[in-house]
Amino acid sequence: MILLKNATFIDWQTLIFTNTNILVEEGPAGKIHFHNGLPDGLSPSITLDCTGLLVTKSFACGHHHIYSALARGMGPPRKAPRNFHEVLKYIWWALDKCLDHEMIRASARYTALACAKNGVTFVVDHHASPHAVEGSLEIIAEAFDEVGIGHLLCYEISDRDGEDIAQKGLEETERYLSAGHQGLVGLHASFTVGDDTMAKAVALARKYDSGIHIHVAEDPVDQERCLREHGKRVVERLRDCGVTDMPKSILAHCLHLNEKEKAILANAPSYIVYNTESNLNNNVGYFDSRGLGDNIMLGADGMHSDMLRSARAAFLVGQGFDEIDYQEAYVRFRKVHHYLEENGFSGDDDNNLVVLDYDSPTAVNRGNFPGHFIFGLESRHVRHLIASGRLILKDREVQTVEEQEVLRLCRGLSEQLWERMAEL
């Protein structure tokens, strides 16, 4: 049990501030207990003095790509992309084909480590490694467990690399789900998924009471191909296939939708996740929540693992393209917790806490917290992190893995990855 002494606790839902001592139980579904005074005979395994510090529920990422972790700093592709489809073809589809199990493990360990340092204790990931499909989800799960980060994983099934690899993706997904792991059934995007693969994926999701995690209308090419090949728009196709009827389904991006598609999603139990900085980087457009309902959460899309940064970007960019204020940005930042709780996923319980050493020059209280959230709080303020009641970050240092060892391994493997990509 961990004791947080003299803490200022912020309820993540009501934003009520309470000065208290907090006892944190360890393990799945562990609770937290508040005490004005300390109980007699208390002997916690760890005591942290939180005088002057803020304590609140830790953060979560609604859409990530660990497979991109070794891309930072790599050279330009062999051909300069002229559009989003070519960005995928010459960069990301080239990278994912070159991944092996060792690179996947290193990417997952680094991503989990980066999440911890940014106050993130739960990640929804969407993975792709077409030539190293088998066992990839188990490798990622083990790496996240090692660091102490909760996870909801899927493999990105696609027909873009042929029928055999699509089948391997289906088999890897079933192997992972049938072993009792919580997970989703991943699909790349409508324009790389044929009717047969789509039907098999939906059937698999229903078999294991799961959902579909898929990119939706990230670029106009998705709509153009869907209209040409299926005679309908992307969200209409997903509705007709049963994807949007699943409460566990996650639809990523959702940029290029018409009003009919928005109405379908507004009345569906599935969730939308958007990724502002990734959209800016790929020059694919801007998210507009109007008409989409309330099931909207935030992701990082492999750009980084800093959800405070994602929320700030969503707010700032949204000033010109969306209806979003400080409070709504915070609501979307926290919506992933509702998604996880409503669907019965474990790993995001009350005993996931972040301790913030926030050096504000002005008062922080319930009334002005959303303003501090947008313009003040940064990942540098994350001092301690507790995941499932376990201290995984103390005084800004990860406690569960050796950070420098992870970084050394990643640097060596990234060079190998880039060399393989250059040979394609």
Image: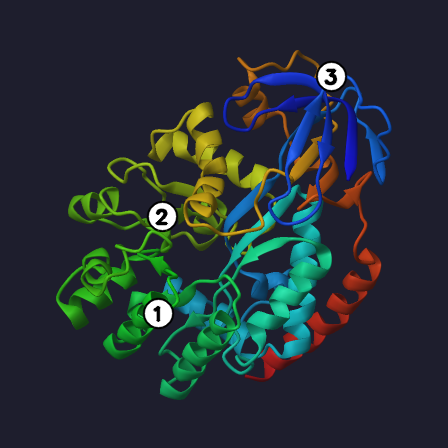
Identify the disc placed on residue 313.
none
Residue 366 falls in which quadrant of the image? top right
* Label 2, label 1: how far apart the Cα atoms are: 20 Å
- Element under label 1? helix
How dense is the environment of label 3, judged by Cα within 10 Å: few (below 14), some, or many (20 and up)?
few
Give left or right: position of 24 versus 121: right
Identify the disc placed on residue 36.
3
* Label 3, label 1: how far apart the Cα atoms are: 48 Å
Residue at image mark 2: 271
Circle count = 3
Image quadrant occupied by the N terminus? top right
Q: Tag 2: residue type?
A: Tyr
Q: Tag 1: residue type?
A: Lys
* Label 3, label 2: how far apart the Cα atoms are: 39 Å
User: Quick one: label 2 or label 1, which is nearer the N terminus?
Assistant: 1
Q: Tag 3: residue type?
A: Asn
Image quadrant occupied by the C terminus? bottom right
Residue at image mark 1: 207
